[in-house]
Amino acid sequence: MKKLAFLFIAVLSFGEMNAQDQYETLFEKTQGQKTPIYSEVIDFFDQLAKDFETVKMVEIGTTDSGIPLHVIMYDDKKVFDPKIWHQDNRLILYINNGIHPGEPDGIDASMMFLRDILLGKIAVPADVAIAITPVYNIGGHLNRGSHSRVNQNGPGEFGFRGNARNFDLNRDFIKADTKDARSFQEIFSWLKPQVFIDTHVSNGADYQHVMTLISTQHNRLGGELGDYLERTLNPALYESMKAKDFPMIPYVNAYGSKPEDGWPQFKDIGRYSSGYASLFKTLSFMPETHMLKPYDQRVASTYELLLSFIEVFKTDASKIVKMAKADREKVAKQSQFNLNHASDRSTYKLMEFHGYESGQKPSDISGLPRLYYDRNKPFSTEIKFYDAYQPGLTLEKPKAYIIPQGWHTVIDNLKRNGVQIQELNQDSSIQVSVYHIKDFQTGQRPFEGHYLHTKVVVEKSIEKMDFRKGDFMVLMNQESNNYIIEVLEPEGEDSFFAWNFFDTILQSKEGYSAYVFEDLAAEFLSQNPSIRTALEKAKSENEELAKSASAQLRWVYENSPWKEKEHNRYPVYRVEK
């Protein structure tokens, strides 16, 4: 586990060293102590694009920093069009770096990785094309210093986790509050990669491993790719990294307990990069190097992991392309979809874990017991890794969803993510299933600019509703069905409803004057004895209701024709089969 990234050049011949010197990175020049500023990163890749015909650098979209995102494209065949890549059944690897710029390991590793490909040190299979975003969170990378990650062991200076508007971009892949995320969605939809890697650095417990890995949850991914990830790809990556003296362990998700007691797989739902990518049937990963390890080791392990992927592609690239194509075609025809997965503790894997003994000792600050890890007491053991998940909600897909044109923020999000949408060409009366929001809980503290809704309960009814020309219909015969279900079904834990896109329906806009409505309500009850009976039943079951005249009047209003139909009516409608 002691490889030093700046020693990579030792294996090169004299001629190769001259070429290497021309493209030597700041990381290498400082023997693994420093990482470059943003302009230096872009200049490095720009120079590669100028000097090598197999590289092209493009700008796509912008960010909250005001600076556009870059995508570096590598193709030995000099074709820089993802549509043609897909037509030719090429495997597309997309590497995203610097989502948290205080974690720059992937930036430096990718600079050396692409350079070494171009210099012939790394042989990339002919049926593989590579795209790299050098720095995703540009605003955070420009906010440079050495104190924002107090526990991290190098480099000397680095960026900040928040973007130019202080958003954590690895919580923004569904809600897309930032220009950064909206541009990323355009890039991802354009590339449609079969494999996605988003580089990170981990915090938490202390242990011997330099590299930990979040693979997207295979049950959520499903299909042929999910089975391949579980049975073939993950084992191959772990075996490869162990052979390179960087034995991996899954991301140590052991908060509140000792790592040696085991832990569940990190649940990468759609707000996170790998969870988002998996919604489009993409094999997705978040490498998480360990923050307490020296920076040169962390970058070296990231570099070696990228090589491990290339090694797998040498035998499995065409297989992965075929599986991704099959899964994407199947999801367009799939009838049932699973949401709200939870860890299944009835099954687990045994994983080899290399840790340090932990204990308690008096704090020098408080005098009270505090946790510590003793690096003089390393140990190795097998831990239980709970990597199976079960769905908490299974839904039948509708034939289509209808979204009134006023909800343009929802429509814009769908379009950016490659969802095909058609407009109604005339005013129409259509029978639909309607959700009414009956209950939910809302967080008491803000989370990434939102107060998330959870534990959503809906009531479903069938109604014939009038829709206008220009309203939108989303047919459920698309490769993006997983994403569509995830964001449009209000009970989904990462749905647009959960992220407050529809909060205006939760507040009634009209009301009544009690002294006037009293007479109308009394007449209404006399004309509708079944409603009167229901009120009496509700009073018998609810003492607070029985004691409150105003609550009873509100009850009548809520069950009367005067209740505003928009209140709590979810404005995305299902056209059933």
Image (cartoon, rainbow, N blue to C red):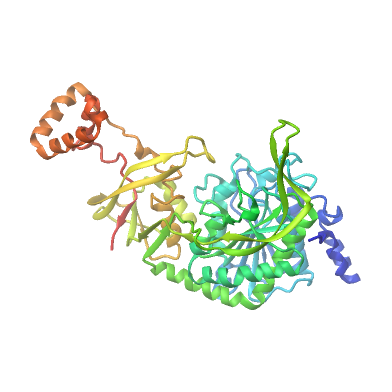
> In the image, residue 90 lies at what x, y percent?
59, 73
Residue 481 in view (yes/no): yes
Residue closer to the observer: 71 or 227:
227
Residue 50 in view (yes/no): no
Residue 430 against residue 448 in the figure, above or below: below
> In the image, residue 280 lies at what x, y percent?
50, 62
> In the image, residue 310 lies at what x, y percent?
68, 71
Direction left: furthest residue: 527
In the figure, is residue 143 to the left or right of 190?
right
> In the image, residue 504 lies at what x, y percent?
37, 38
Residue drawn 57% across and 73% down? 320
Residue drawn 61% across and 68% down? 234
In the figure, is residue 54 to the left or right of 395?
right
Q: How many marks?
A: 0
Q: Quadrant of the N terminus?
A: bottom right
Residue closer to the observer: 36 or 222:
222
Residue 283 against residue 544 in the figure, above or below: below
Q: Quadrant of the C terminus?
A: bottom left
In the figure, is residue 51 to the left or right of 318?
right
Residue 212, quarter of the rendered image: bottom right
Direction right: furthest residue: 14
Residue closer to the observer: 354 or 538:
354
Residue drawn 64% across and 48% down? 137
Residue closer to the observer: 297 or 33:
297
